[in-house]
Image: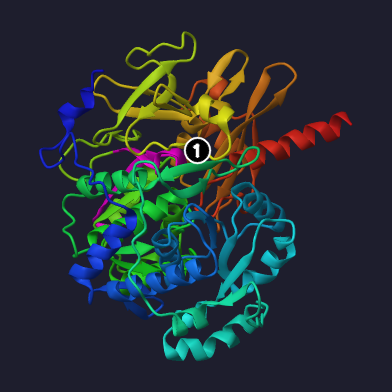
Amino acid sequence: MEKPWLAHYPPQIPHHLDYPQKTLTDYLRETAAQFGQKEAIDFLGKRLTFHDIYEQSLKLARYLLEIGLAKGDRVAIMLPNCPQAVISYYGVLLAGGIVVQTNPLYMERELEYQLKDSEASIIITLDILYPKVMKVKGATPLKHVIVTRLQEYLPLVKKILYPFVQKKQKQPLVRIEERDHQHLWEMIMATVQKEEIHMEIDPMEDVALLQYTGGTTGFPKAAMLTHHNLIANTIMCVHWMYRCPKGEETILGVLPFFHVYGMTTIMNLSIMQAYKMILLPKFDIKTTLKTIEKKRPTLFPGAPTMYIALLNDPDLSKYDLSSIKACISGSASLPVEVQEKFEALTGGKVIEGYGLTEASPVTHANFLWDGERVKGSIGVPWPDTEAKIISLETGEEADMNEIGELVVRGPQVMKGYWNQPFETESALRDGWLYTGDIGYMNEKGYFFIVDRKKDMIIASGYNIYPREVEEVLYEHPKVREAVVVGVPHEYRGETVKAFVVLKEGMNCAEEELNEFMRSKLASYKVPRIYEFRKELPKTAVGKILRRALIEEETKKGEAKLG
């Protein structure tokens, strides 16, 4: 197939890359050997070297084997960003297990579903999440629970003060005694001897990770990502960021590692490239601003909502964010207004990328430095990644600038869905991954996403793409966040509704917004209904849950009919 985007690649980015037949743990072993005493993690002031990470990963792997883990068994990791999350990930892989990343914010119903679906026999979690795990344990295949505490990896003073902080924040003080099937992380690290472990792993075929899709609609599905999938995507990332020498960068790790985007662009990239990770267990505006000023990270992978939140902080001007030289924004579309403001603030580059769980996750991005950046575009496919648009009407490859479904193919694309052959056949056809995203490619080979296939609004026969309407809403000086959905309408079939969060201290009448929108859009695209809210529902990565709002509207409609 023709690849017009390759003509725009800067000479520093090869069109084709080499992907060694290695496992993810091979990279940890090599980095620990070459950069063993280099600082790998800064967690709230506690520092660990690459040697520390490798040694403790080996201890955990040895223990997992002692309690019966066999090659291919699933181990759930239910942790925020902390040293234990990194050690657990690589420890499970060293033991030949498959990681099941589990969101710490899950409620019992969601947790039970994932543990049953993945058939995880072991879970590694925090003490404050232990009661939640025990409530569902009996209904799942879980045999062992390994429990750790955040304060185990805090500097001495913070470790002493931590119980008081927990009490002030009204967090439960959970006491756990080691007994059959319950295991204490602290005891594992203190008593297990580290020994080299060499499992027979086929990087091309053996699954490293079961990564569940966002689950904003229906039940989540688990993408089976092999060692090769994850390594290929990380190597692509290394070459895309060619001005970031090995061993010389510091990454702000606030994107959660239980999300594949944070896992690849922060954790796996840092291990492969010997970068220092500054870990924050959750995104907090003030903590993030203080951390950037004090710790001086150079790379800040994030989500648009994170950049928006920082830009709207009333004390923003008090902080020096000039250390940031590159940000790759993912998980949702990046409003042009946000990109320009954040670049002006930091002096660094902020580019929009595109990916999905099933592709480990990145497939497209704009160029950070020497190539052309196209505003509003997700950029061009990464090396060895093919992409095309499929016409919604004919099912054939679409013409230039014709809107259709984006499909991708490359070494980062998943093996399939776990125990879901029908879903796998639907998503993977002749090696092509059908993304469910609607977009187009221009003459230069730059791709644009206009919306999710399921989110397109059809009003009075017109196709309306929520992203286009949202981009205009973000241009209004009083709007902080916005999301657009289609709601039932007796005459138009569907009509456009906008949910809007205003900037702090701002007031805005519906008439003002409506007038603004009508000056920018064709009348059929202008929202007919506005709802002002203090906040919008989001995933842990900060992605706005459009489907949750659609479900709200559906229930309202049913209540009216009822």
Q: Give, as a three-letter code, the residue at label 1.
A: Leu
Q: Is residue 294 above or below residue 438?
A: below
Q: Nearer the viewer, residue 465 or 2?
A: 2
Q: Nearer the viewer, residue 143 or 216?
A: 143
Is 44 left, or right, of 32 in this rendering? right
Q: Quadrant of the N terminus?
A: top left
Q: Nearer the viewer, residue 283 or 248?
A: 248
Q: Nearer the viewer, residue 397 or 230?
A: 230
Q: Quadrant of the C terminus?
A: top right
Q: Quadrant of residue 198?
A: bottom left
**What residue appears at the point 62 percent right and 81 percent down from the top-left corner?**
178
Q: Position of residue 326 (x, y in %)?
A: 26, 54
Q: Is residue 77 above or below residue 523?
A: below
Q: Position of residue 208 (x, y in %)?
A: 42, 50
Residue 440 seen in this snapshot: yes
**What residue appears at the point 41 percent right and 54 percent down from the top-left corner?**
262
| Magenta-colored stretch includes residue 348 | yes
Q: Please, which residue is most extreme toward the right here?
A: 562
Q: Which residues are magenta?
A: 345-365
As helix, strand or loop, the secondary structure at mark 1 comes to: helix
**Residue tagged 1:** 473
Residue 479 seen in this snapshot: no
Q: Colour scheme in the image?
A: rainbow
Q: Please, which residue is most extreme toward the left here?
A: 11
Q: Is residue 318 above or below residue 481?
A: below
Q: Quadrant of residue 35?
A: bottom left
Is 112 left, or right, of 126 in this rendering? right
Q: Position of residue 97 (x, y in %)?
A: 47, 56
